[in-house]
Amino acid sequence: MTCMMQAGLWAATQVSMDHPPTGPPTEEDFSEVLTQVHEGFEVGTLAGPVFARLRRSLGLAEEDYQAALGPGGPYLQFLSTSKSKASFFLSHDQRFFLKTQRRHEVQVLLAHLPRYVQHLQRHPHSLLARLLGVHSLRVARGKKKYFIIMQSVFFPAGRISERYDIKGCEVSRWVEPAPEGSPIVLVLKDLNFQGKSINLGSQRSWLLRQMELDTAFLRELNVLDYSLLMAFQRLHEDERGLGSSLIFRTVRSVRGVQSPEQSGAQNRRLLPDAPNALHILDGPEQRYFLGLVDLVTVYGLRKRLEHLWKTLRYPGRTFSTVSPACYARRLCQWVEAHTE
């Protein structure tokens, strides 16, 4: 399957290289579906021009994107502690993250895409994961499988020591750590983080404000169950002390709306000179990788019934299935309580 994904993505990216989108996205761009037929399979590209613009806004060259996701090297598959049955992959350079999605999840994502693009234009330093593509894969006459591509929050991963998936609750939020010296890389959860804190120094106020802006947006979309991904990397001696100078009302390497009336709301900062800078915050001693992911769970009837059942099942305990307003507020409170 990954070989087919690689061949399909190479061809799909070639289309955007040969016909780069111009001007602002149109309604047709958001609904476009391009199907390319290969020997034994076909790959669909959904809203291709929109995602090509998003990649360009990040300063990502299409040639680099194509090389990382094409047949140049095998994808890395990894085991997840997530309850979903999704498959997870990394590009061979570990820069891009691929995840299989259910059809209704893709429908939700595409329905929210215009507002997602607008939010990133208004808040170019948002913590929301940067989606770079949505595709379908069908082998012969089989059922379509869908997958998304986004920037990996945990990049570059070389010196990362701990990884966490935080939802701000306690039920089912513990992962048994790997034995000391084990090569297995685990993403831990809320209860594993007890007794720890994030020391951001002067960057803390920026993070708290950006969490408010991003979770307010997700609350408006009526979604919940998203996660704050977080990783730790100890700074080298010559890297320390730089974080305190990184908060400015300016921006580089990311294009955003420049209108004066919005400048105060954008919560911009000077980005560190590092790969994946949007998801990196440097504190006095540690570098932190941060990003909000899994933005497709809508608080509909099924989730409301699940909330009722869990209220009876776990009296007095916190769990993930709550209203979007409660979910957003609780996650912001978790960040405020665990940062200094």
Image (spheres, rainbow, N blue to C red):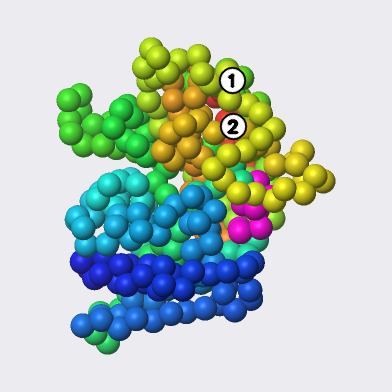
The residue closer to the viewer here, 124 or 340, is 124
Q: Quadrant of residue 29?
A: bottom right
The residue closer to the viewer here, 321 or 327, is 327
Determine crowd level at label 1: few under 14, some 14-19, many 20+ residues with C-alpha closer than 10 A: few
Residue 4 in the figure: left or right of residue 256 = left
Q: Are marks 1 and 2 in contact (CB under 8 Å)?
A: yes
Residue 267: say if magenta: no
Q: Is residue 111 above or below residue 258?
A: below
Q: Quadrant of residue 178?
A: top left
- Location of the N terminus by quadrant is bottom left
Give the labeled residue for mark 1: 245
Residue 176 in the figure: left or right of residue 22 = left
Rendered residue at 42%/49% (across/down):
151
Rendered residue at 41%/72% (across/down):
18
Q: Is residue 282 visible?
A: yes
Q: Is residue 174 visible?
A: no
**Type of the residue with mark 1:** Ser
Q: Mark 1 to mark 2: distance in Å? A: 9 Å
Give the image location of residue 108, x and y in percent.
Answer: 55, 67
Rendered residue at 65%/53% (across/down):
121
Q: Is residue 52 above or below residue 329?
A: below
The residue closer to the viewer here, 155 or 64, is 64
Q: Earlier in the sequence, mark 1 or mark 2?
A: 1
Give the labeled residue for mark 2: 270
Residue stretch in magenta: 116-123
Q: Residue furthest right?
A: 261
Give the image location of residue 112, x and y in percent.
Answer: 60, 64
